[in-house]
Image: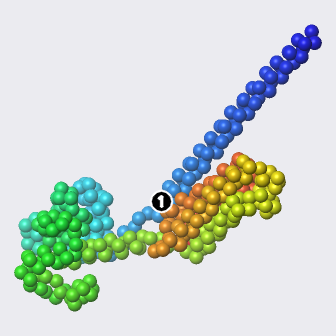
Amino acid sequence: MKRKRKSSKGNWWQRIIGPHRKSSQKGSFFHSVLLASLVFFGFVLFVLLYQKNTVYRWHFPKSVLMHREMLERVAKEKGLSADLEVLYAIMNVESGGRLKDVMQSSESKGLPVNTLDTEESIEQGLSYYKELKMKARELSLDEKSVWQAYNYGIGFLYYVKEHGGLYQDSLAESFAKEMSGGKTVPYRNKIAIKENGGYRYQYGNMFYARLIEENILRNREKNKMAFSIVNKMLMSGSAVLFLYIMLLETFMTDSESTARVFKMSVKDLKGKKLNTLFKNQGIYNGLLGIALLYGTYRPGGGNMELSVVILSIMFLVAVYGGLSSDKTIILKQGALPFLSLVSLFLRW
């Protein structure tokens, strides 16, 4: 009887404890999945907020942008929405938006100069540009060849194909020279003045592709969001914090300082598995810090999008650590990255 009771007691205990352990394991698993999902969606949210906050703007003269609604409507109809930057540049170079024939496209339709009104000019100009683009694709030519051909005519595309298949400024010059018979006219544009003292051949404009490129680069440069002093201070602080964490975890793994910061004993930190885990985790944190410094101080200007991605990872890793272990991690490790993100979004 005693044996049965003992066996019964054992079975009863297993019935209570066994399911409890299983349930606990399941709960821990789902808790981890939930936290990981929150971190992932938080990362996506930060990136979307950044993209929404940094809308691309057109930096062209008001006289050009006054035709924006019409230009963008026609571009959409013709499947050229991705080429709007080039189309705005063409309009600016051709007329500055101030002439009736804003795209100077009358001649491409076989009409005298400035025959078309504004809407017809945009319609014809974009049709002509699309035709050139399709022909260039057929001939495997680059985009600059299309730009120059808008000024010279479709014959220039065949000329480029016959002379190597890649646009060069020298090809634009030699084509104009051949077509004009070597005749020149004064041209007081700064590019021409710098290059040849201020002339062009009496056939189109051999500097046309460079003028388009100049407009595009100017627009892109003005769209760059430079880091403010506040941005740089907060981001540098975030990077230094994560490099400090690397120092503790990778190079001072079983030190008193590391034990105090992570609220563990030196004995535990000397354990082989935990010691290796800390060192690996430290490298990961250090690389985040280095990547953020690169995004902040990259030669030629900081990389805004890279910095937002790195800061988002830093903050969300801190949130995960806080929710899964010690809530103070959110403040200690996540405060600086979070403030850095806020300063970028608010453009402090």
The secondary structure type at the circle numbered 1 is: helix
**Which sits in the foreground, 345 or 40?**
40
Q: Which quarter of the figure is the C terminus placed in? A: bottom right
Observer able to see residue 117? no
Q: Which quarter of the figure is the N terminus placed in? A: top right
Give the image location of residue 120, x and y in percent: 17, 64
- Compared to 254, does 226 lie above or below? below
**Which sits in the foreground, 20 or 41?**
20
Of all residues shown, which one is farthest toward the top?
1
Observer able to see residue 259? yes
Q: At 67% from the left edge and 40% from the top edge, which residue is drawn?
A: 31
Question: What's the coloring here?
Answer: rainbow
- In the rendered image, which quarter is residue 180 located in? bottom left
Residue hosting label 1: 51
Give the image location of residue 296, x and y in percent: 54, 70
Give the class, few, some or many, for how many residues have Cα within 10 Å of label 1's Cα (few <14, many ≥20).
few
Give the image location of residue 84, x and y in percent: 30, 63
Q: At 6% from the left edge and 81% from the top edge, which residue is drawn?
A: 181
Tell me: 134 left or right of 21: left
- Compared to 14, does 70 lie above or below? below
**Which sits in the foreground, 347 or 191?**
191
